Amino acid sequence: MKLSIPVMETIQKRHSVRTYENRPLLPQDREALLTCMKQIDNPFGVPVHEYIIDKELNAEGEKLGTYGVIKGASTFLGVSIPDTELAPLAAGYEFENLILFATHMGLGTVWLAATFNRDSFASAMEIPENELFPAISPVGYPAAKRSLTETLMRSTMKSASRKEWKELFSQNDFHTPLTKDMAGAYAQPLEMVRLAPSAKNAQPWRVRKTQNAYHFYADYKPGLSKGEEVIKQVDLGIALSHFHQTALELGLVGTFESLPQEDVKLPENLHYMISWRIGE
């Protein structure tokens, strides 16, 4: 389902916010988020559950909840999924759609995958025990000035920087860079992929174009823990939200499918996830 917001404009406006005004969400803003949570879906056929809770924080930041990384926020969003194939992609896709909707409303958010106390949030949000709980986000009104902690984090992670096209997108094999001219109508969806947020700004996605499809891979070294793999795949789901929602905004036709990859030798750090078959 296409989000009822200007997608490309919102993607380019979105940035991570870790410092918030110390005031609760207005009732109408909370209601708008709840309505969006009920309406969003994903193209992978996976049931995704979103949550919203209010949590009192002190002025210094909640050490128990977010290790002092988040200042001032009193409301948090969360997402959980079944432990099934494609579920992490679906989580990234749906939760990013919710975050883009919040951005369009003028609210601040930031994806948190590691810097939060999973047990306390799982308990507060009543996450089912058999579900994966990959991420949360504060949601609120951005403060006029960033905290020192946030300024240092953004500098360390180079939050505003992104990899170049030639590092992310290729044509037919993994040796021929895909240019914007080659991508044609899909240049804008791919540019929105490039701008997607990710854990530690690792940008763990690679896209390969063939004649009638774009193939998406998660980029991570073999031997990661299950939890780390899930986060990399969630990150790809965020990028897929940007790709698909932009394609829908531009009226581009296609479907997500699992397609054979025998025509190419995969580097060991690339893990095939899904393809976008271009429609007629």
Image (cartoon, helix red, strand yellow):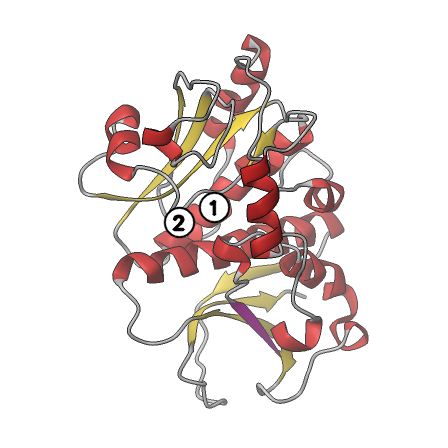
Question: In the image, what residue occupies the spot 57% across and 85% down?
Answer: 174
Q: On screen, 59 above or below 263?
A: above
Given residues 91 and 161, the one toward you in this image is 161
Q: Nearer the viewer, residue 156 or 18?
A: 156
| Residue 65 in picture, x, y percent from top left | 35, 31
Query: Which structural element holds mark 2?
Result: loop
Residue 277 position in % (x across, y down) = 57, 68
Give the labeled residue for mark 1: 42
Magenta stretch in the rendered image: 205-211
Membership of 128 in magenta stretch: no
- Image point (41%, 59%), residue name: 233
Q: In the image, is residue 117 above or below residue 243?
A: above
Q: Which residue is mark 2?
A: 45
Residue 278 shown left or right of residue 43 in the figure: right
Q: Could you tell me how far apart the alpha carbons at marks 1 and 2 are, in whole angstroms?
A: 7 Å
Q: Are marks 1 and 2 in contact (CB under 8 Å)?
A: yes
Tell me if residue 268 comes above or below residue 109 in the rendering: below
Q: Can residue 255 be spotted in the picture?
A: yes
**In the image shown, does 185 or 149 lie closer to the viewer?**
149
For the stretch drawn in magenta, the main secondary structure is strand
Q: Amino acid at mark 2?
A: Gly
